[in-house]
Amino acid sequence: MVSPRMALLGRLNTLSIVRPAPPGLYLDGGTHGEILLPRRYVPPDAQAGQQLEVFVYRDSEDRLVASTDRPFAIVGQCACLRVVSTKPGVGAFLDWGLEKDLLLPLREETRSVRPLDWVVVHLGLDEKSDRIIASARLDRHLDQAPPPFTSDQAVSLLIECETPLGYRAIVEHTHRGLLYRTDLATPLKIGQSLKGFIRTIRPDGKIDLSLQPAGYRRIASVTDQILEKLRAAGGQLPFHDGSSPDEIRAAFGISKKAFKQALGALYRERRVVIDDAGFRISSKQTA
């Protein structure tokens, strides 16, 4: 949120109502002057001096305009957006949750796109036109500074693409990181938004990610999951070191590595007994 005297294009602003007018309400845009909030967005109880939270952008005639609708992303953020239409020599137009579609200029495309395609983009201001535009050239906008994160920090992730090692994700709209396939219980989807954790930051600045917190907390959450399934199955399950990763994923939704760590913790706590047939709840747990 920003001050009423600092209305920023492409962001959410809290602006004061200056006066009503036939087309809607005029809001105090500070150095931008008065900004129109079209009548279709005007709250029924709006009064002069009242503050409204609005998104500020440019209309088709390059005039600043406000909206109470929320776009899927604001300037400085990344999002996976659907292509609505394309125009030869101009680029593609994307649905970003507002009445006016967002332009992905041809020069900012990394591949040819068609209507109904989905594309991961960064939102920014065009230096020449001062319009909000999308860019699929993420290298220009991400990883421009050393990662400000710490190990085991919870972060927002946007899945950008699949790689031989796993999935590359955009971290907090500013950096890239890698989710390793061997740590994932199920495949991910390009454009999927989810919560993750910083596993490590390497000396070269590259970020390794995880969908689970590190250390004991991660193991504890998995052990609870295994015990729940064990009780639901009557106290015994036919899984062991020889079970395949696919069998483990199908049964528990976790990697074999996570399964072995959690099962080992349960065994050391004498909560389960492990034998050739699998593992079962110990007499200590059933007593």
Image (cartoon, grey):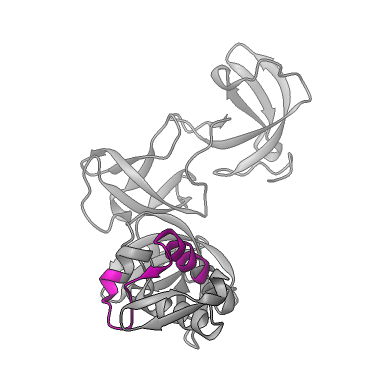
Taking 273 as reference, is 238 above or below it? above
Instruction: Give the position of the C terminus as an image quadrant.
Output: bottom right
- Name the side, left or right, on which 26 lies relative to 62: right
x%, y% of residue 50? 76, 26
Q: Is residue 26 magenta?
A: no
Taking 54 as reference, is 111 above or below it? below
x%, y% of residue 92? 29, 43
Q: Is residue 234 magenta?
A: yes
Residue 175 shows in this picture: no
Taking 264 as reference, is 145 above or below it? above
Taking 26 as reference, is 215 above or below it? below
x%, y% of residue 247? 27, 70
Front residue (pair 197, 83): 197
Q: Residue furthest bottom?
A: 203
Front residue (pair 126, 47): 47
- Name the side, left or right, on which 192 lies relative to 33: left
Numbered marks: total: 0
Residue drawn 38% across the image and 35% down it: 101
Residue drawn 33% across the image and 64% down it: 251
Residue drawn 39% across the image and 77% down it: 279
The quadrant holding residue 155 is bottom right
Residue range corresponding to the magenta coloring? 223-247
Residue drawn 20% across the image and 52% down it: 112
- Name the side, left or right, on which 241 lies relative to 262: left
x%, y% of residue 35? 62, 29
Q: Residue furthest right?
A: 49
Residue 76 shows in this picture: yes
